[in-house]
Amino acid sequence: MSEGRWLVVGLGNPGPQYAGNRHNVGQMVLDELARRAGTTFSTRGGGLLSRRPQAATAEVRIGTLPGGAPGPRAVLAKPGTFMNTSGGPVSALARYYDIPAERVVMVHDELDIPFGAVRLKRGGGEGGHNGLRDTSKALGTKDYLRVRVGVGRPPGRQDAADFVLRDFAAGERKELPFLLDDAADAVELLVTEGLEKAQLRFHTKGA
């Protein structure tokens, strides 16, 4: 699994007014991964780099391989477009860095997973997630990896679209650092040791 470079994308909406929303938890995970790597995101432009897709990126070594060697090279990316049009930047990044879909990892919020849980899968449906739907269309395949960060279902009759565009509740914010830490661990384990080992660890966590 560690062969070649990876593209790890955190989904969300741009702008400070959205930064704390549940819908932006994927980008929060990317911030944690960048922090671990001791780097920050850049939106460099100009010259040849002006052809780079609309995204903030950071090039890192991600995780640690068994035996202690640095993990594989990866591009961390936060699209600069709104969630519903994430696919364009993702596909452009994959082309720019020559990364195949099987080494693209999408980190995103998931309504159908309880808050605090992390699940992983390759391919399958998008579950009504517009960011994933647009990504599948742009890549021409659903066969990419997903790290699904649970935000839970909205309470009562609250609309799901409204729920994900609100910040985490006060009680959730206390637990959020632990969730982000788990999700970042899941990304690292996925790219260094593979999907099955990551699923075994995180799908049985707390069971």
Image (cartoon, rainbow, N blue to C red):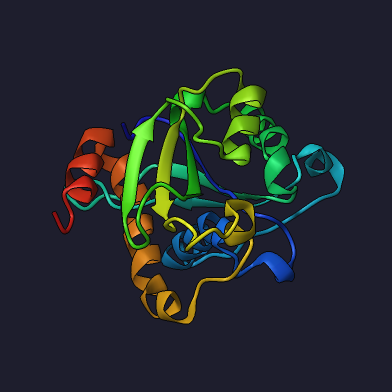
Q: Residue at x 65, y 32 (%)?
A: 134
Where does the image place residue 17, in percent across and percent down from the top left?
73, 70
Question: Which residue is painted at 18% across and 55% down in the image?
Answer: 205
The furthest residue to the front:
157
Q: Position of residue 167 (x, y in %)?
A: 58, 71
Q: Is residue 97 visible?
A: no
Q: Is residue 123 above or below residue 24?
A: above
Image-based side of 154 in relation to 20, left or right? left
Q: Give the position of the N terminus as an image quadrant.
A: top left
Residue drawn at (18%, 48%) of the image: 201
Q: Say whether residue 126 is visible.
A: yes
Q: Is residue 61 left or right of residue 157?
A: left
- When the figure is inspected, residue 176 is found, relative to residue 46, above or below; the finding is below
Total labels: the figure holds: 0
Q: Residue furthest left?
A: 207
Q: Residue at x 44, y 58 (%)?
A: 151
- Report the side of 20 relative to 8 (left or right): right
Nearest the eye: 197 or 179: 179
In the image, 29 versus 82, the foreground residue is 82
Pick whichever, 46 or 195, lies toward us: 195
Residue projecting furthest to the top: 140
Identify whether 93 is placed above or below 83: above
Give the quarter of the figure containing the C terminus: bottom left
Residue 138 point in image, percent of width and height: 67, 25
